[in-house]
Amino acid sequence: MTVAIWCILVAAILPYVAFSFVKGLDPLQPRFHVTELSGQSIRAYGAHLNALETFPVFAAAVIVAHMVGGPSRFVDLLAVVYILLRIAHMVAYIAGRQPVRSAMFGLASLVAIVIFVSPLFR
C-alpha cells in the first residue's frame, strides 16, 4: 500500500481526534446538548464536522489518482501535505484562529483537487 492510501486512514481518524476536545456532552445522548456547547468545545465540534465533510473528497481523490494513474510519489507527497494542512486546520479551528483556519481549509481543498487531476499530467 502506498503512503497516500495510508493517508486515507489518517484522514478518517482526524475527525475523532478533533471530537476528543469536545467537553460537556452527555455520553448517553451526545447530540442532545450540542447547542449548549461554547468556546473551545463548540469549535472542536465544528472541526470534527468539517473533517467529516472533507474526508470523502480526499479519499475519492486518492483512489481515483491510483486507479487512473497508478501509484505515484507525487500523489504520496500531496497526500501527506493534505494531512498536515488538515491538522493545521483542526488546530487553528480549535484555537479560534479564523484567518489561518480558512487558509488551511482552502489549501487542503486545493491539494485534494490537484491529487484528483494529477493523472492528467503524467
Image (tube, rainbow, N blue to C red):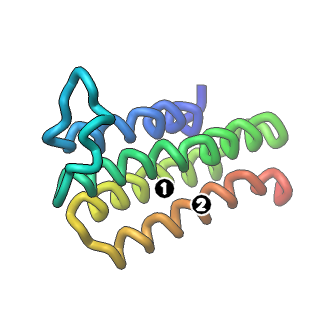
Task: Please say if 48 is above or below 40.
Answer: above
Mark 1 to mark 2 CA distance (whole Å): 8 Å
Q: Decide if residue 75 is on the left or right side of residue 45.
A: right
Name which quarter of the figure residue 85 lies in: bottom left
Which residue position is annotated with label 2? 111
User: Of discs 1 and 2, which sits in the foreground?
Assistant: 2
Where is residue 83? Give x, y as percent: 45, 49
Which kind of residue does numbered mark 1 sit on?
Val
Where is residue 30? Give x, y as percent: 28, 31
- Give the residue at x 78% y 56%: 117
Where is residue 116? Give x, y as percent: 73, 52
- Give the residue at x 18% y 57%: 38
Label number found at residue 55: none
Count residues near mark 1 (Cα–Cα under 10 Å), then give few for <14, some for 14-19, many for 20+: some
Name which quarter of the figure residue 66 lies in: top right
Label 1: element kind: helix
**Is there a contact, CB below 8 Å, between mark 1 and mark 2?**
yes
Name which quarter of the figure residue 94 lies in: bottom left
Which residue position is annotated with label 1? 81
- Give the residue at x 28% y 44%: 34
Label 2: element kind: helix
Count residues near mark 2 (Cα–Cα under 10 Å), then give few for <14, some for 14-19, many for 20+: many
Which kind of residue does numbered mark 2 sit on?
Val
Q: Decide if residue 32 is on the left or right side of residue 14.
A: left
